Amino acid sequence: MSDFAQTVKQQADIVKVIESYIRLRKAGAQNYSGLCPFHKEKSPSFSVHAVRQFYHCFGCGVSGDVFSFVGKIENVGFPEAVRIVAQKCGIPLPKREFSSPEEAAGARQRAKLLELHETATAWFEEKLRGPEGAVAREYLAGRGLTPEGIKAFRIGYAPDSFNALRDRLSGMADQETLRASGLFSSKEQGDGSQGPLYDRFRKRVMFPIANESGRVIAFTARTLETGDKAGPKYVNSPETPLYSKGQVLFNLDKARTAIRQVEFALLVEGQMDCISVFLRGIQNVIATSGTAFTEQQVALLRRHTSQVVVNFDPDAAGSNAAEKSIALLTEEGFTIKIVTLDDGLDPDRYIRERGVEAYTAALRGARRQSDYLIERARQMFPGQSSEQKVKAMNYLLPHIRRMPQKLSRDQFAADAAQKLGIDSAVLREELHQAALKRRDHVEVRASALTEVERVLLRALAITDTDFEPSRHAAAQAIGQQPAWFEHLGAFAAMQALAGRQANDPMSVIEDEAQRALLAETLLAEVKPPEENEVLSAIQEIQERSIEIRQRALRAQIGEAERRADFAELALLTQQKLDLDRALRQLHQTRDRV
Ligand SMILES: [Zn+2]
């Protein structure tokens, strides 16, 4: 590890860094726990050790230090992880080092694209304030947006020009980078090459899309034209090295603190709905931007909450997107409630026309997902005929099967049978089977370690000089008599620890499974073991290893007898007598203690 990485690691607090991604709760004197961001789970098995500065998941077995966490969650390599942690902790960066020229070029390009987006955002904001922005300002005022709201979301205006933005940005980057930004379009030429760049967004209101850190990475642009030449109502940035539509949740950067505080996220469809609701004080609101949820978006959200209130548009398209999103969230174990607003209003109009109190009341009246779906089934297939009931049930069954918990499936099936008035035994059995269909999985694995192994691992991981004799005793025994310890599951970890020079025990174990054994041991630790505890653990392990060799010898002796190999037999018998004596002596020392 470089000196710089070492400095960052010493100054960074792993609890704070991890808390910037997921919710943690204090779980003990030295540790915190939360839902693991690396595997699906409903009860927390992810732990962070505040003193030893590492994390470990008892569910999926991942463990490591602050850099490994950031590397995994941001999906970046070690140098990039060091840089991100340094930035989070306000530590100035040295000149950057990259592992490959491609990585360096990629990072340079992303930095440049962020800069272009920042400049474009400021420029669009300026154009909105200027004389060209009059119509856009009027439109925004009509949608109930105040100047403060416009400023908070950095809403801007792209003037009616093919080259105004291009002229503004062309001095900042080469053509290739400008093309990669997605801010420009070009036409394919006769020879198949791309023609000159021109502004993609023209005469449109510009809504910036930010990443989780609040940096602008893309735009949604709404037209101000009406009639034939208006084009599509909304135009979005294309996929770029900065932006992938399915991986961003609109407003998560502003909403995440509130989401953790109130412990649920309010999910709306449109960016305008989201802005409108947020500016009226309901700050835990995010938007999917009119499409169904993706798995990456679910993973993003899971870091902050597992409860969602969904308030999508009541029109048909809205309901389909809503259903897809609800299906995915259900599969991922989220608790979901659904709001339907009176008179088919969308959140933006509802909150503007009826006020924030009425909207808050509507949110409180959100229905459980199962109630919502049963109601929808009844509307889609009304009537009491058994044909309609079968259709309603066929609509509900996949939703029931999708729920990860059996208890919820049972409840859902029972509710559906009752509310749809299903009295047929066959249909009831069908519902019952759907509820049985999935098995709840057990998430916490039992430890593979014995008590004496834990004592040794704890001794070897000692960093407190008061307990140095304990560490020394363990390290010496493993260094001098490795054969005694070979049969232990954590042998590789013990050897690495016994030979360690660095101060951080977690960092010397390279094998992930071995490191996990140490992590789970240390998370359960109250204080380091005393020397006599370590010595008796070593003795017990020595006895165990002798017993293992005795068993092996007995098998070999039996084999030699069958072959009538008396020379071999004499040798083996002598070895066994030696072992028996050694074991007796060990027992005697223990009895004396
Ligand atoms: Zn996990």
Image (cartoon, rainbow, N blue to C red):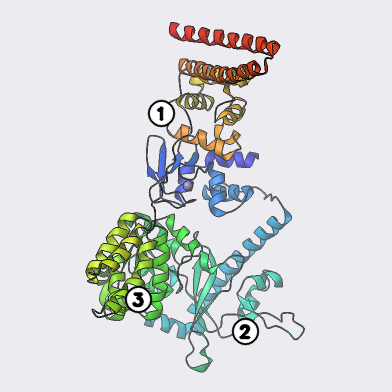
Tag shown at residue 382 = none
For image coordinates 30% across by 66% down, the residue present is: 370
* Dot 2 amino acid type: Phe
Which image quarter holds the N terminus?
A: top right
> Which SS class for mark 2?
loop
Choose the circle earlier in sequence order: 1 or 2: 2
Q: CA distance from mark 1 to mark 2?
A: 67 Å
Q: From the image, state whether disc 1 or disc 3 is nearer to you.
A: 1
Q: Which residue is mark 1?
A: 526
* Dot 1 amino acid type: Val
Judge the density around disc 1: few (<14), some (14-19), many (≥20) Cα neighbours within 10 Å.
few
Q: Which residue is mark 3?
A: 348
Q: From the image, state whether disc 1 or disc 2 is nearer to you.
A: 1
Q: Where residue 235 sits in the image (x, y, percent)?
A: 53, 79
Q: CA distance from mark 3 to mark 2?
A: 32 Å
Q: Where residue 366 sits in the image (x, y, percent)?
A: 27, 67
Which image quarter holds the C terminus?
A: top left
Judge the density around disc 2: few (<14), some (14-19), many (≥20) Cα neighbours within 10 Å.
some
